[in-house]
């Protein structure tokens, strides 16, 4: 899992302005491996559909993953015949590798991909990308598992698909319904932030990207699709399922340990420009209050159980101190992770030390209450002691939340510097359409993530977007089988 990247903040969503002539708004990538038979009919059908129905300029990019048949020749012929078709040649297989390479270098503000077999009805393409163009959503996926979807496929693939998505929901808490449908789109500004964090280069690429996007707070739009299984699919089900499960384990482990910097992908509070002018306004207070109350209620029960247990062996003051000490450590750890969203081990010792200071204040309040009760009654009932302690703990709880928020976890706020809600003016304009460059212009190297930039002594892996085949420098990742997605 790539954890050495600093992804920065996500820009504000903005409606893409009307495009000038020839400026592509949408770049549809068709990853292929040994598809010389189906590539031509697929691309021509897709081109005809977009020309007839899509109201913006578009581009179709054929991403050839080291095909050994006549696929490169067919792709070059399509690029020569159709002006909006380009071809990219990679010397290594892997659908995720192809998508990351092309998306990282594309200048279109909306990026999409679909499988070469066109199993998904193309009438869903405009509904797929419309929320991204409008600025409403960050990613969009076609879903074969939505209630209004119409799907034709065998019982075996249906069972595998639904089981896989149940695994994602149970292990990674994914809320999207279909991770494997080969029909997805993403805004380029969001892709530039997310792609350096995605490690997989094969079939799990989609799932990993969606999970990270969801955890980063991105909005994912789902489109019900009509989908017909391809009987000639060459997908290796067992191998693909094994790799997917390994990916689920890897991503789940990274999320559990907090090694992914997703908490830094701040999104402005709203898309209204007035929201970006707000400064010093605390955000996330309601969510933190709910989390703190839940943790506080559980901690209080835990404290009362400990106090009742210790009271059988010692006096009330010592039992209170021991119960508070144990519950305070658990309370600080729970609030650190659940209420304030602090992950990883960094600063854990300091947070516990500060939590113990807060514990000392609570101890003073509760001990003082017990001392006052003892002065008022020589032998108070146990129920009276508990009632006094509950009242004292309520007062201590309010003070504890204020101290946690302002002193122990001040950097956990969404408005912290690392998650600044006000964006500089250039970042807010990032989602606008780029100016069309000359036909022979070289794609800027800065569009590529660090792991895909060429070394100084190597030739530039990207040539001009022309009818000629582009050959990027291969990235050294383990080979992953690339065949059409018909799962």
Image (spheres, rainbow, N blue to C red):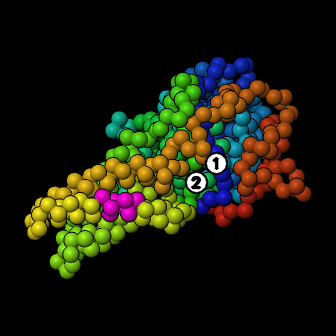
Q: Position of residue 50 (x, y in %)?
A: 60, 27
Residue at x 61% of width, y 53% of height: 197
User: Against 202, is 39 above or below?
Assistant: above
Position of residue 393 in the picture relative to residue 245 (left or right): left
- Label 1 crowd bin: few (<14), some (14–19), many (20+), radius 10 Å: some
- Asked if marks 2 and 1 touch (Cβ < 8 Å), the reply is yes
Q: Which mark is residue 7?
A: 1
Residue at x-position 60% and y-position 44%: 417
Q: Secondary structure at mark 2?
A: loop
Q: Earlier in the sequence, mark 2 or mark 1?
A: 1
50 part of magenta stretch: no
Q: Nearer the viewer, residue 184 or 466?
A: 184
Q: Residue at x 33, y 38 (%)?
A: 147
Using a 10 Å C-alpha cutoff, classify the residue at mark 2 as few (fewer than 14 neighbours), some (14 to 19) or many (20 or more). some
Q: Can residue 219 be seen here? A: yes
Toward the bottom, the furthest residue is 313
Kindly identify which residue carries mark 2. Answer: 261
In the image, taking residue 251 as reference, residue 431 lies left or right, namely right
Q: Quadrant of residue 429?
A: top right
* First to last magenta residue range: 358-365
Q: Nearer the viewer, residue 54 or 313?
A: 313
Q: Position of residue 337 (x, y in %)?
A: 43, 57
Residue 271 seen: no
């Amino acid at each position: 899992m790539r954890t050495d990247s600093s992804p920065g903040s996500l820009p504000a969503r903005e409606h893409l302005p009307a495009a000038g002539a020839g400026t592509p708004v949408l770049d549809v990538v068709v990853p292929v491996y040994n598809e010389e038979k189906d590539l031509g009919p697929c691309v021509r059908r897709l081109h005809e559909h977009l020309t007839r129905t899509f109201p913006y300029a578009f581009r179709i990019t054929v991403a050839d993953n080291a095909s050994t048949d006549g696929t490169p020749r067919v792709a070059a012929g399509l690029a020569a015949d159709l002006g909006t078709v380009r071809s990219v040649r990679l010397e290594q297989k892997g659908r995720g590798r192809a998508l990351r390479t092309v998306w990282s270098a594309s200048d279109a503000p909306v990026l999409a991909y679909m499988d070469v077999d066109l199993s998904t009805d193309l009438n869903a393409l405009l509904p797929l990308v419309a929320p991204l163009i409008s600025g409403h959503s960050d990613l969009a996926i076609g879903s074969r598992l939505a209630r209004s979807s119409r799907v034709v496929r065998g019982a075996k693939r249906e069972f595998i698909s639904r089981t896989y998505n149940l695994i994602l929901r149970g292990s990674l808490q994914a809320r999207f319904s279909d991770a494997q449908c080969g029909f997805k789109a993403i805004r380029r500004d969001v892709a530039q932030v997310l792609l350096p964090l995605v490690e997989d280069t094969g079939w799990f690429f989609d799932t990993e990207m969606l999970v990270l996007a969801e955890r980063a707070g991105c909005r994912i739009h789902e489109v019900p699709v009509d989908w017909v299984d391809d009987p000639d699919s060459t997908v290796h089900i067992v191998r693909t399922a094994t790799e997917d499960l390994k990916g689920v384990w890897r991503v789940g482990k990274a999320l559990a340990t907090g090694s992914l910097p997703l908490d830094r992908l701040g999104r402005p509070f709203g898309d209204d420009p007035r929201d970006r002018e707000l400064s010093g306004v605390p955000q996330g207070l309601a969510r933190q209050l709910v989390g703190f109350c839940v943790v506080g209620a559980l901690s209080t029960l835990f404290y009362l159980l400990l106090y009742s247990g210790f009271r059988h062996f010692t006096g009330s003051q010592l039992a209170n101190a021991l119960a508070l000490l144990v519950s305070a450590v658990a309370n600080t750890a729970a609030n650190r992770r659940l209420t304030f969203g602090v992950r990883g081990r960094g600063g854990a010792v300091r947070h516990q030390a500060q939590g113990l200071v807060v514990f000392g204040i609570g101890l003073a309040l509760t001990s003082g209450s017990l001392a006052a009760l003892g002065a008022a009654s020589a032998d108070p009932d146990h129920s009276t002691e508990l009632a006094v302690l509950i009242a004292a703990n309520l007062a201590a709880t309010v003070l504890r939340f204020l101290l946690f928020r302002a002193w122990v976890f001040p950097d956990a706020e969404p408005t912290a510097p690392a998650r600044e809600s006000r964006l500089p003016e250039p970042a807010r304009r990032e989602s606008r359409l780029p100016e069309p460059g000359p036909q022979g212009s070289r794609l800027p190297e800065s569009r590529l993530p660090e792991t895909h930039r060429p070394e100084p002594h190597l030739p530039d892996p990207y040539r001009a977007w022309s009818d000629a085949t582009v050959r990027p420098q291969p990235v050294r990742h383990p080979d992953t089988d690339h065949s059409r997605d018909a799962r």
